């Protein structure tokens, strides 16, 4: 949650109603992502009314990925369901999501907001382009990678790390961690009742860059030398072949002016770039083996 004081009482009552109707044992975790309104005070009041409420407050706004990661780390349930606190995700979807995880055996179920109540130009159209690209790159057939309403088997959330702005790609991260039983469910999308959207068009530009990053990390994060080394070897081999050919022309065939030909400089350039790629791969291997925890957030309070 981030500045959602108006929606929190209604959301909590709605979740509580659904859970009790289905006889679920449950907990509700609120992650306050540095709200500047009265959201934390509202949650403190809710804690007095609902003993199932737990909450964590960040000192400042760290973003959705850090908030989800804290929720994953501190959740106790066998099934973990995430949703935004703005009432646009419906708690009525919880029983079916639970069934798809617990009874149908899925690792992750992503919500698909087939009918959306968002701005067409700033959210709907860019979302379609973004999701189409994500499907093509990842091979995961989901219509809505970024839907906040998702359900997870406990093993998934305890074995993945969400950092930076990678919450958009949790299905890809889960697949990279070995959880391949991923599916989706059409879910209801509510029109925003309070406040305004916290996201702008720029998130889609950053989203494409993050997609390239997570795809690379998923394939080569533990073996970066395989990527850099392959291209380094290819470029170096082509460069050496070019220079060998030019040397053959000069020494054996007596062709003059070899060093002034453009192909000579191309051969030199390819060798230099190839060596640099080898060095980059070597350094990346060292970094990947000694990387620190990438989630550097400070929790101000816990209840």
Image (tube, helix red, strand yellow):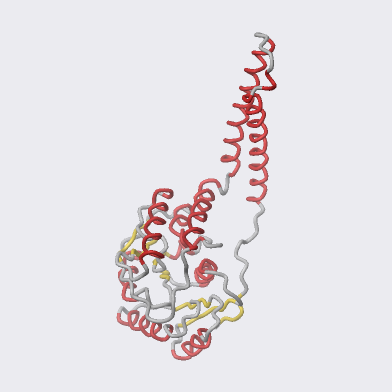
Seen in the image, is 269 located left or right of residue 22? right
User: Residue 259's quadrant in the figure?
Assistant: top right
Where residue 239 appears, as percent x and y from the top left, is 63, 27
Where residue 69 appears, as percent x and y from the top left, is 52, 67
The image shows residue 276, relative to residue 22, as above or below, that is: above
User: Residue 94's quadrant in the figure?
Assistant: bottom left
Seen in the image, is 220 located left or right of residue 180? right
Seen in the image, is 211 located left or right of residue 93? right
Where residue 67 appears, as percent x and y from the top left, is 52, 71
Seen in the image, is 241 located left or right of residue 84? right
The image shows residue 259, relative to residue 158, as above or below, that is: above
Q: Nearer the viewer, residue 166 or 159?
A: 166
Q: Nearer the viewer, residue 31 or 124?
A: 124
Where residue 266 appears, as percent x and y from the top left, is 63, 28
For the point 48% across and 52% down, the residue is 176
For the point 45% across and 55% down, the residue is 172
For the point 35% across and 82% down, the residue is 14
Q: Quadrant of the C terminus?
A: bottom right
Task: State the residue lying farthest toward the top.
Answer: 253
For the point 44% across and 74% down, the residue is 197
Q: Nearer the viewer, residue 25 or 207?
A: 207
């Amino acid at each position: 949650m981030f500045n959602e004081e108006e929606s929190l009482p209604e959301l909590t009552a709605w979740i509580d109603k659904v859970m009790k109707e289905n006889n679920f044992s449950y907990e509700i975790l609120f992650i306050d992502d540095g709200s500047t309104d009265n959201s934390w005070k509202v949650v403190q009041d809710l804690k007095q009314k609902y003993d199932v409420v737990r909450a964590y407050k960040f000192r400042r706004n760290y973003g959705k990925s850090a908030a989800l990661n804290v929720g994953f780390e501190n959740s106790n349930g066998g099934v973990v369901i995430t949703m935004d606190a703005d009432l646009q995700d419906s708690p009525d979807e919880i029983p079916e999501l639970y069934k798809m995880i617990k009874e149908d055996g899925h690792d992750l179920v992503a919500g698909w907001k087939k009918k959306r109540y968002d701005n067409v130009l700033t959210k709907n159209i860019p979302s379609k382009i973004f999701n189409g690209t994500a499907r093509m790159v990842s091979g995961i057939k989901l219509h809505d990678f970024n839907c906040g309403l998702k359900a997870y088997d406990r093993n998934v959330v305890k074995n993945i790390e969400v950092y930076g702005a990678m919450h958009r790609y949790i299905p890809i991260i889960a697949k990279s961690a070995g959880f391949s039983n991923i599916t989706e469910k059409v879910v209801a999308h509510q029109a925003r009742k309070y406040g305004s959207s916290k996201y702008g068009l720029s998130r889609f530009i950053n989203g494409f860059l993050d997609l390239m990053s997570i795809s690379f990390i998923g394939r080569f994060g533990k073996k970066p030398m395989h990527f850099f080394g392959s291209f380094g070897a290819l470029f170096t081999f082509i460069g050496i072949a070019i220079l060998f050919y030019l040397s053959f022309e000069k020494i054996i065939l007596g062709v003059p002016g070899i060093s002034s030909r453009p192909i000579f400089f191309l051969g030199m350039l390819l060798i230099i770039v190839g060596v640099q790629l080898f060095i980059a791969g070597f350094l990346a291997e060292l970094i990947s083996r000694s990387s620190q925890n990438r989630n550097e957030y400070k929790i101000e309070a816990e209840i």
